[in-house]
């Protein structure tokens, strides 16, 4: 079986790559690294059943060979992202979905669309089942994501009805786990990062709004069961265990042993006050429900964050940055970019909110096929260093 997976270097997409490879699939993954990370797939780059293509699916593209499945997981998925890049969010949720559907139609492949609980908006029905039409502000700041996903669902069902395409739609509720971005902006990485560094945990609103958190391993098992099912209408996949954000903050503080205080700020516009999936459909037709308890999932997530971040307060030096970049390797040669002497210059510009790190790199050829991958890897690595707010990477030939 061969599958095309967009968003393959993302948080959920990379875990799906792992699961599909484990189950014996050939995986063609694509990503443009707008929010995905090269490090998420570095451990499978040399797997003979895995192929990666750097591609923005908002632009038409082709895939050689047969495909049995096409899975569309390409999209910014955090408010910090889609409020910063609204046009890219709308493009990938419209043109991107169309292009992926066209490939599925051409290849006569099963198509799975990654949708979201955000299609329910700020729900008036609780918990939310798949028949609920939602309560969405179509012109609010979050609409670029909400409406892009609602359009994607409509387009997917139209291909099913018009062309007989075997389509699936998964509505993903709040998910957490390893490989979440440190600066993701969502509640789990925010709280864990703040707690580990003993800085105030920021709650937006009064903390009484609720969420239901599903560990990523449970989520991808549910997605796989949907992919191989005969269901064509949307299915909720998430954990129905509901808690308030304030309760969740207390769990994080306890599990990390943090001394962080809790501070409250204003609630963003259209932020949903209730979020809990009704998973009766998944239970009945997929024989699926989450198994991993919140404490177990958080223990794994916290351990991953501890390993992948540099604590706040560590002195930021050129030597320290070079040391961090030793972990970034050219995926084809297998050597560190530092050992290959690709780093030409590092400049640290400090300001009151943190530091901007400017890096100049030399490459041997302007046609280097892995240039985008390497640049993104360098940027991602530097931005995990405590005290760094952003990194600029310049290529010099």
Image (cartoon, rainbow, N blue to C red):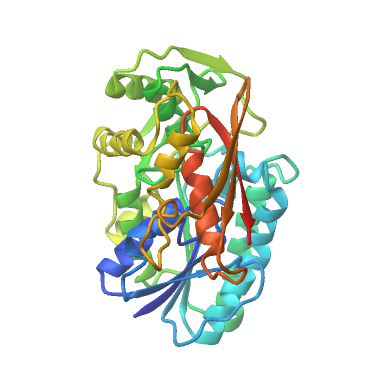
| Residue at the image position 27 percent from the left and 59 percent from the top | 287
Q: Is residue 79 something that shows in the picture?
A: no
How many badges with numbers are in the image? 0
Quadrant of the image containing the N terminus: bottom left
**Identity of the residue furthest to the right in this view:** 139
Q: Is residue 106 something that shows in the picture?
A: yes
Q: Position of residue 175 (x, y in %)?
A: 41, 44
Q: Picture quarter containing residue 265?
A: top right
| Residue at the image position 55 percent from the left and 86 percent from the top | 106
User: Which one is nearer the viewer's eye here, 390 or 96?
Assistant: 390
**152 is higher (above) or lower (below) than 68:** above
Q: Position of residue 72 (x, y in %)?
A: 51, 65
Q: Position of residue 9 (x, y in %)?
A: 46, 58
User: Which one is nearer the viewer's eye here, 212 or 325?
Assistant: 325
| Residue at the image position 26 percent from the left and 70 percent from the top | 23
* 150 left or right of 303 in image: right
Q: Position of residue 168 (x, y in %)?
A: 46, 67
**368 is higher (above) or lower (below) than 340:** below
Quadrant of the image containing the C terminus: bottom right
**146 is higher (above) or lower (below) than 43:** above
User: Which one is nearer the viewer's eye here, 222 or 328?
Assistant: 328
């Amino acid at each position: 079986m061969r599958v095309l997976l967009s968003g393959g270097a993302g948080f959920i997409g990379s875990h799906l790559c792992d699961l599909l490879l484990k189950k014996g699939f050939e995986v063609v993954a694509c990503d443009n690294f707008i929010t995905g990370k090269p490090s998420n797939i570095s451990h499978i780059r040399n797997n003979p059943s895995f192929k990666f293509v750097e591609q923005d699916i908002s632009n038409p593209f082709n895939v050689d060979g047969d495909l049995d499945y096409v899975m569309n997981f390409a999209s910014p998925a955090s408010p910090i992202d889609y409020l910063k890049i609204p046009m890219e969010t709308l493009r990938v949720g419209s043109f991107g979905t169309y292009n992926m559907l066209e490939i599925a139609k051409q290849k006569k492949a099963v198509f799975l669309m990654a949708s979201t609980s955000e299609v329910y908006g700020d729900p008036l029905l609780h918990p939310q089942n798949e028949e609920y039409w939602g309560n969405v502000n179509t012109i609010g700041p979050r609409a670029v994501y909400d409406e892009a996903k609602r359009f994607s669902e409509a387009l997917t069902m139209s291909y099913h009805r018009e062309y007989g395409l075997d389509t699936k739609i998964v509505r993903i509720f709040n998910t957490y786990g390893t490989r979440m971005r440190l600066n993701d902006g969502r509640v789990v990485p925010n709280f864990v990062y703040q707690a580990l560094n003993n800085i105030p945990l920021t709650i937006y609103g009064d903390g009484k709004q609720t969420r239901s958190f599903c560990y990523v391993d449970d989520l991808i098992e549910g997605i796989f069961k949907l992919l191989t099912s005969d269901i064509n209408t949307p299915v909720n996949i998430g954990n129905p265990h509901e808690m308030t954000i304030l309760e969740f903050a207390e769990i994080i503080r306890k599990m990390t042993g943090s001394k962080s205080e809790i501070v409250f700020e204003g609630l963003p516009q259209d932020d949903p006050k209730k979020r809990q999936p009704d998973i009766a459909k998944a239970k009945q037709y997929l024989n699926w429900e989450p198994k991993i308890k919140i404490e177990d999932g958080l223990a794994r997530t916290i351990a991953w964050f501890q390993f992948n971040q540099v604590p706040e307060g560590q002195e930021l030096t050129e030597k320290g940055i070079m040391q961090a970049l030793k972990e970034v390797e050219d995926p084809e040669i297998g050597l560190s970019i530092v050992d290959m002497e690709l780093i030409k210059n590092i400049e640290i510009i400090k300001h009151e909110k943190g530091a901007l790190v400017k890096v100049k790199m030399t490459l041997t050829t302007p046609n280097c096929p892995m240039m985008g991958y390497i640049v993104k890897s360098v940027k991602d690595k530097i931005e995990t260093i405590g005290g760094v707010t952003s990194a600029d990477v310049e290529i010099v030939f």
